[in-house]
Image (cartoon, rainbow, N blue to C red):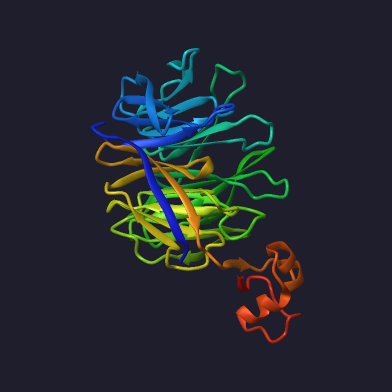
Amino acid sequence: MPNIGANQIWSLTNLNNPVRVAWRKTNGSQAQLVAAAGNVVYLFVPAAAEYTLASTADVGTQVLSLAVGLQSQFIVVGAADRLIVFGIQEGGMLARVLETEPELGAFFVDLAIADIDGDGREEVIAASEGKEALYIYRQPQAATLELLAIRILPGPSQKVAVLDRGSGNLPLIMAAYKNNSTSGLLTLLFTERGFVEGPAEPNLPASVMSLTTGRLRGPNAEEGAWGGGDGALHLVAVNDHLNNILASNNLGSFVPALTTGKIGGESRETLVAGSPGGFLFGFKAPVVRAAPDWAVGVGRPISSLDLGSAGLLGIGTSDGSAQVWQLTTTGDPNSIHVVSPGETLYTLALRYQTTVGAIARLNKLTDTDLIYPGQILTIP
């Protein structure tokens, strides 16, 4: 197991509600931390070794979901009947710039922002629990959000994420919905005829509590990961079907928060899960083991995570705290690699700056010409 350096560099308590967090990228400086709790959105900016409160905005209604995007400039919150968008004025103050038309009873419980149609502009995908649907909004102009489509789901919407398929393909929308006591998972692809349903799995083994995507098995395309009400993390590959390729060990009573990104000192992505017991669990790509690569206690029940650049992890807790941690790894002598089609021990030795013989000895390979796609190798 690698050594993990996890240092809390900032914390704010007494926000009095479960906290959602997201990073907002800025040009030429460290990212800003956005948090939402109750009816209020907070903007924190880096200052010396901590973060200071730059601005707050009262939404006027409970914030159900939070995302940052639309060219990284805007903060989008989901409420009971609409989406509300905030920008940053000169001087760093939050300003309410637009909102969508009311959708009574929608309850927008989750948001994803990505360019799903390949036009170079990002869309907002909003998961509506009350209407059992996804609402997709586009931004034809800087100060507008226009409803592009509504996609009805088989049950109340829970979570939504966007999966990059690589190789110039348009991304997939991945959505989780309630299905009796568990959940279903489906994918949607934008086409000239509108949104077409892709691979789906209507009967997952547990209810979906969190959902994310990342390059978790290889560099060419992303996989999905969902945290379950069974306390496990589940990894899903998307091709002609949704393939459940890994279920983790039990991480707690349920898994309310997931995020992916690169932590300090790593060239590969790490999948980070948060538990209501106050623990972070890290799974390094390629994720091939049920046990986490590392675990860290943060002392508070985790409800939201966002891993930004340079290994900065934003944490929101269910008891009203916002935190920033710095994550780094050291002392991991070996790597895990999942063989892709066309790879040989020679190409792997070049990639990892080692030798064919060293890889063969570590993996007890008698024939250095025989490796196969999907094989798991330990790389010195």
Q: Quadrant of residue 106?
A: top left
Nearer the observer, 154 or 177? 177
In the displayed structure, would residue 110 be above or below residue 214? above
Q: Quadrant of the C terminus?
A: bottom right
Q: Quadrant of the N terminus?
A: bottom left
**Residue 341 seen in this snapshot:** no
In the displayed structure, would residue 362 be above or below residue 195? below
Q: Quadrant of residue 96?
A: top left
Q: Is residue 237 left or right of residue 103?
A: right
Q: How many marks?
A: 0
Nearer the observer, 187 or 63? 63
Q: Residue 266's spot in the image, x, y percent?
A: 56, 53
Residue farthest to the front, as pictured: 48
In the displayed structure, would residue 321 be above or below residue 155? above
Residue farthest to the bottom, as pictured: 366
Q: Is residue 120 left or right of residue 107?
A: right
Q: Is residue 63 left or right of residue 76?
A: left
Nearer the observer, 59 or 146? 59
Q: Residue at x 42, y 61 (%)?
A: 294
Q: Residue 8's spot in the image, x, y percent?
A: 36, 43
**Residue 260 seen in this snapshot:** yes
Q: Residue at x 27, y 49 (%)?
A: 299
Nearer the observer, 364 or 102? 364
Q: Residue 15's spot in the image, x, y percent?
A: 26, 31
Q: Residue at x 48, y 18 (%)?
A: 88
Q: Residue at x 38, y 61 (%)?
A: 232
Q: Residue 67's spot in the image, x, y percent?
A: 46, 33
Q: Quadrant of residue 356?
A: bottom right
